Amino acid sequence: MTIAEDYQSALNALLDEPVYGLSQSEKKTRLQSVFALLHQHHSQHCTPYHNMFRQPVSHNTPLEQLPFMAVRLFKLFALKSVPDNDVVKCLMSSGTSGQVPSRIFLDSLTSRMQSKALVKILQQFLGKQRLPMLIIDSPDVKGADGKLNARAAGIQGLAMFGRDHTYALNPDMTLNSDAISAFCQRYQDQPVLVFGFTFMVWQHFVSALKTSGITVHLPHAHLFHSGGWKKLEAQKVSNETFKQQLLAVAGISAVTNFYGMAEQVGSVFMECEQGMLHAPVTAEVLIRNPYDLSLVKTGECGLIQVLSTLPYSYPGYSILTEDRGTVHGVDDCMCGRSGTYFTVQGRLPKVEVRGCSDTSSSMGSGA
Amino acid sequence: MDKHNLFDSVLPASSSLNDLVTHPPMPVASQSILNFIQALSDTLLKDPASRAFPDIVALGFWLRDGNIKQLVKQINGYGQQALIKPVGTVVHYTPNNVDTMFLYSWVCALLMGNRNVVRLGSADSPAKHLLLACLERLFSLPEYSDIALRNLFVQGAKSDESNQALAQIADARVLWGGDNSVLSIKQYAAKPRCRDISFADRYSAVVINGDKLTDGEQLNTLCELLWQDAKPYAQQACSSPRVLFWLGNKNLQSEFARVLNHQALSENANPNEGISRVNEHLVVSQWLQCQSFADAPLVMNRVSVIPVHQVNTEMMVMHCGDALFYLQSLDSLDDLANCLPARVQTLTYWGVERDALLKLLAEPSIQGVDRCVSVGKALTFSPEWDGYRLLVSLSRYVQLDWG
């Protein structure tokens, strides 16, 4: 069998396992074989990857000894491990404040596997039935240029769990009160799915509802949100406040946060009832000391390294993020799910541009 | 030219650009200038708050009477067949974060009797705060009023109007801050005879002779000195070495990287600072490795040492400082000739024979290197800086021929 075939069969077998059911030792063995195949594949088909990681990797290589790539490299290079003809989609991260966005190249295999893995994970929380879906965003998010930004990709990923997709916001990010009212009227007595990015939900839904006087009552809704707390931290909004306010303004009591990134779509870490993020069977997290990149002990905060079995068309199966987090344990979360569980503590601080070559050019504006 | 329209704040607070130019420059190295510099030195060295800032202490030492007298002697030497006079008004554009560097050029201009306007960067820092507080104190004393009338520190020169006003009064401009800063300031037209002293983007290197390194003792000394050159300003000063050229025997390279890191760790006052540093270094290191520009780092911790195959312009642009070193191995000193483009400012050396180095630097084809000093002295300021002779450039030379 070829590497590609070996990889697909190993990944499919992994996807057949329960999402949070394998013991950590069993999971590690299975992950190691997949990562050894991915390492071989990327070494052969992605020259920058090969140049960077010359060390041998086998199915015996422990997860913590796998090479890892700084997430920013996806902004600096167009990294792919499949021929150009095989690329079906290019995902762009939402480059914050004028930054160059990450570019993630997907072939049909990776794209398919991402959806499959995402479905498996979300079904654990949503059930198999498609629910009416309220999207806290504007229909314009999709963009017209064919390149998919991360927000649109996230919405697209979740949209397959819903029906009667209703966008709650107008193109100018104001509340679309007609659409919201109609949705509430029709579905207030039944389970519905609400999805949005954390900041969008807070700024353009919760806060906007408070000031607008529009009443929303969706007592059977389950809200899923993701995208990080950076902007909310700045406004001193905690997870608790977020949940309290959602209940107050929209009657929504079921709220689930998840952690994931454009560079590893399909690999999401869902928050459990205990407030812990859980690694699914297809993924793992490791925490590294930011001062020397060594592995830290359980309970210590450090840089989050994410490992995902899904990236085949681009060399992103092992990424060192710029987020800080803490692993709290393995296999013994009170919620009953197996595997590693962790929390996220926010972003690594931005490095100030300093020194001789950053000065008065800004003409005193400090830019 | 109302100060309130032009700048957010000025020091001395009662002064303005208009007032400044009404006072004639002072005689070169006049007693009252020397007294003021002495007082500044004393204030900086005696202020307990200075101790937290090694570069302020270094500045205080540099300003001491003995050192300044040497400079005066030098100036007197220039005036053998000439009159040496102030150039007029010197406008200094200071960098944002290399807090103390601009004070050296200001003192040079002051010593030559000039009126000065120092345009401060917008960034705030404790060191800058301390320096300005000392100056404010001295300016308020009656014995230094003649200095206070002729020297103005301005902050928040945002508008075109304020920058035009600064450009128009300048007889000389000292432009710190690298290529972009220099070019953007030069867009404001100055007088036709205005002299611009432009500190552009440069980087510095050290050449280490691996054949002369034999024991751990030497390695310790080398790393101690090298860290003195790289630690201040988080390696952002152009004079701090970013490239290590290693001649000959490479056996001790790994050990060198370890010892340098150890040296840096041992001087680490606050282990929790710089939480983003290693990630920044990882990005650079992987960026280099991706393109086969480098091998895996020898160390990546408090300092990072990355063996590169051949230093190029791109990788110098990518260099983010903060204790990051590119290590390039060379077979012999002759190979260094191809590694010193115009952008190289300071070359420090260890274990290299002086005559051989001198012979190399004299090569007309070598465009780089405006300072060559032994390792440990990269940041020691002298009025000969970055290829300029500041005391000469900031004064007028009146030629005399009575014959």
Image: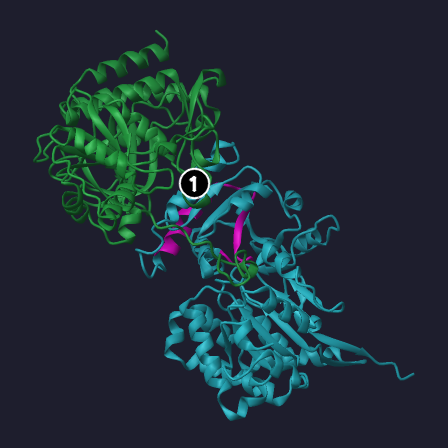
Chain colours: A green, B cyan
Question: Bounds of the magenta span?
Answer: B236-265
Picture residue at 25% right of the left edge, 24% below the top: A164
Q: Residue B259: give x, y in percent of width and height.
A: 40, 51
- Where on the picture, by quarter, is residue A331? top left
Q: Is residue B181 above or below residue A253?
A: below
Q: Residue A161: within the magenta?
A: no
Q: Residue A51: give x, y in percent of width and height.
A: 47, 28
User: Image check: B182 left or right of A265?
Assistant: right
Q: Residue B4: give x, y in percent of width and height.
A: 52, 76
Front residue of this view, candidates B210 and B88: B88
Front residue of this view, candidates A86 and A159: A159
Picture residue at 23% right of the left edge, 28% below the top: A133
From the image, tell me which residue sits under label 1.
Answer: B283
Determine the residue located farthest toward the bottom in the rendered image: B142
Q: Is residue B223 above or below residue A56?
A: below
- Where on the picture, by quarter, is residue A184? top left
Picture residue at 50% right of the left edge, 63% below the top: B98
Quadrant of the image containing the N terminus of chain A:
top left
